[in-house]
Amino acid sequence: MIDIELIRKAPEVVRESLKKRNMEERILDEVIAVDNEWRRTLTDINLMRKDRNELARAIASLAGEEREKAILHTREISNGIARKEEELKALEERRSYLLARVPNVLLPSVPYGRSDDDNVEVKRWGTARAMDFEPKDHVDIGLALDLFDLERAAKVSGARFFYLKNDAVLLEFALVRYAFDILQREGFVPIIPPVLTRESALFGTGFLPFGEENIYRIKDEDLCLVGTAEVPLGAMHSNEILSYKELPKRYAGFSTCFRTEAGAHGKDTKGIFRVHQFDKIEMFKYCLPEESESEHEKLLQTAERFYQGLEIPYRVVSVCSNELGASAAKKYDIEAFMPGQGMYREVVSCSNCLDYQARRLMIRYRSKDGEIRYVHTLNSTAIAVERTIVAILENYQQKDGSALVPEALQPFMGKEMIK
RNA sequence: GCGGGGAUGGCCCAGGUGGUAAGGCGACAGCCUGCUAAGCUGUUGGCGCUACGCGCCGCGUGGGUUCAAAUCCCACUCCCCGCGCCA
């Protein structure tokens, strides 16, 4: 949620941001119009309420005909107020509805662009391993090594599901253990959160109403399957007031993630790269407003560390205006090099949401000078397990069809090779 | 699922026979003292406006009764404690 005060005082800032996102500006004009009407109506009501209160107070000390008269008059005023209050309520609802649909204001450093192609590469790390053979993609490698069963998953659950098997299972647990090793050193509190949350948690983190079609819902209950641990980690401190002393707060949550992948028809239909259910470790930070931009850079560095440790080449892109989620004011993606596909593919998404989620979730802190303000929130993938398995298989494949285990994982895996 | 208890400002907690939120703690500011502590004073929910002021709203949520509701009535939500069931 952006601050209504910002819309009142500097609507041009919001307008520019909407333009940059290639979104309709009409919503902004409507918010302004409705807000003006709301304020006028509220002022009217306040005056009427004042009259009523004065009369009601006087009645206590009146008697007889005077009292009767006053009661009658007050009743009239009350009826008038009730009518106006209905108008006010409707305006308020309309304003909230609209305001909840205005995306976050972009930071100035976000590059303008219309598609992924306009993302700006800001860094490249590592070099692809030399291969004196034609690299295979993860599907071929994995099927040959019996690491997953996609056909039976399709039979049981449908397209975009998988059974992970054999060493792939060990690899997953090794990755998880590896990640939490690093995360604890970096001061993140390990968490396993609920993967079913109320709608309010999804709304608060900005996945509703913007990502409605991507969410699985539980029938007849106010519960949804989360698409990322960002939801329960962000909502964890909703309606709380933290102390500036405990900021920044860092959490790392392991969770299964569920996504309908609506609108992704035809994209990455094979394998385990884009699926309805996968496991992921997500980092989440709550911090002081003045520190969120530097914390964002730090968070990116932490995310990079996982791939550096695995010795997987990657690049970092600054995601362009059109591709940013509603909550994010700025976002970096890490894309790992996938030799089998001959391209860089997204494995990490690292966002700064400023106070956008904090406003929706009512997460505040008491500052050193005693003021209560909204915190800033940031989130980033640490390890998206299945995608990282894809990257490992493609980068560590060998001529004979086997795949090496990255050195950093060997202690957790108990073996050096998958064959 | 059944029974009982509870929800009030940053936190704790009063009010409960309807008349318009008391007190404590903490925090912040000021005063006082050579410094610290103590002490004293003030501030410390949200919103609107023709803004050193005026007013409105606010006691879990939504309705109702009333001139007037934290207080009475109805429904709901969440939390806690027992019991039952259960991985």
Image (spheres, rainbow, N blue to C red):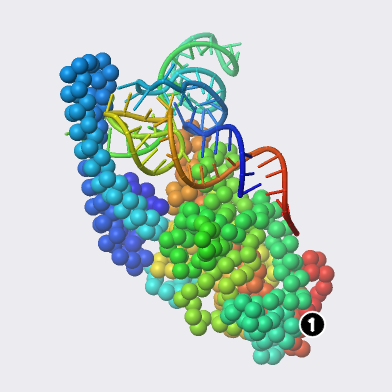
- The residue under the point 39% across, 73% down is A114
- Coordinates of residue A125 in the picture (x, y in percent): 61, 70
| Amino acid on which disc 1 is placed | Lys
* Left or right side of A385 for B15: left
Mark 1 lies on residue: A419
Res. A303 image quadrant: bottom right
* Left or right side of A308 for A211: left
- Coordinates of residue A107 in the picture (x, y in percent): 41, 57
- Coordinates of residue A367 in the picture (x, y in percent): 50, 37
Chain name for mark 1: A
With respect to residue A35, does A158 lie above or below?
A: below
Q: Secondary structure at mark 1?
A: loop
- The residue under the point 44% across, 50% down is A360
> What residue occupies the far bottom of the structure in this picture?
A133
- The residue under the point 63% across, 55% down is A193
Res. B41 image quadrant: top left
User: As rendered, which of A264 and A151 lies closer to the eye?
Assistant: A151
User: As rendered, which of A318 and A170 lies closer to the eye?
Assistant: A170
Q: How many C-alpha atoms fall within 10 Å of the one at disc 1: few (<14), some, or many (≥20)?
A: some
> What residue occupies the far right of the structure in this picture?
A414
* Left or right side of A155 for A202: left
Res. A69 image quadrant: top left
User: As rendered, which of A315 and A26 lies closer to the eye?
Assistant: A26
- The residue under the point 33% across, 62% down is A18
With respect to residue B33, does A129 lie above or below?
A: below
With respect to residue A279, does A60 lie above or below?
A: above
Query: Exactly how many numbered labels are in the figure?
Result: 1
Instruction: State which quarter of the image contains the C terminus of chain A.
Output: bottom right
Question: Can residue A40 be seen in the rendering of this structure?
Answer: yes
